[in-house]
Amino acid sequence: MSYQFQGQTLAKKQQSQRGRRSQNESRTPATREPREGRSLMQVLAGVFGLSFLLAGVGGFIPGITSNYDELSLFGTDSNAELLGLFRVSVLHNIVHLLFAVGLLAAARFSWSKLYLLGGGVGYLGVLLYGLIVDHDSEANLLPVNHADNFLHLGLGSAMIVAGVVGLAAARRST
């Protein structure tokens, strides 16, 4: 009798495990459990988030940022340049650090989608700002230069493309 009881318990456990497996397999990437791995969208959000974190921190490191002694809070007074190309200020570095939230967005599919697509549109908006504002005027608060404009075009486009590719991959997997 105890053998049958154990057999029934074992069968119930196996049946329960099969049910859990089929539930997890039917889940969309948005509800995927962390142990099942990250979606492409989450990985891409993490990569962009890490890039922005490195740029934001790098903007405060002499040597990585040339003319570091001329780094100002904001505006055209700042002549510091990240990697000797991209004009930065304390405000500009903080914006990069805020965009590093992509690392947090990578924790959830819905956040990573919003981060990549919304962030891409946001960076295209910064590109428009850079094209419209006179680079030598006081209105240039970030400050941006021509190299920044090309970078913002590339970042905005790349984030939107990454978001669309991530969405397509998620649709294919479901």
Image (tube, rainbow, N blue to C red):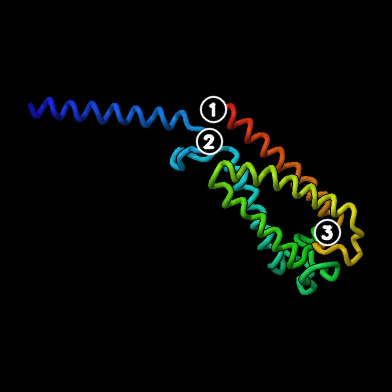
Label 1 to label 3: alpha-carbon separation? 42 Å
For the residues labelled 3 and 2, the Cα–Cα distance comes to 37 Å
For marks 3 and 2, give the one nearer the viewer.
Answer: 2
Q: Amino acid at mark 2?
A: Pro
Q: Amino acid at mark 3?
A: Val
Callout 1, which amino acid? Thr
Q: Nearer the viewer, residue 142 or 66?
A: 142
> First in sequence: mark 1 or mark 3?
3
Question: Which quadrant does the N terminus fall into?
Answer: top left
Name the residue: 26% across, 31% down. Answer: 13
Q: Residue at x 85, y 50 (%)?
A: 128
- Residue pointed to by mark 1: 174
Given contact means CB atoms under 8 Å apart, are the residues at marks 3 and 2 in contact? Answer: no
The residue mark sitting in front, 1 or 3, is: 1
- Residue contact between numbered discs 1 and 2, judged by CB atoms under 8 Å: yes
Marks 1/2: CA–CA distance: 8 Å
Q: What secondary structure is marked by label 1?
A: loop
Q: Whole-percent x and y of residue 158?
A: 72, 42
Element type where label 2 sits in the image: helix
Q: Are marks 1 and 3 in contact (CB under 8 Å)?
A: no
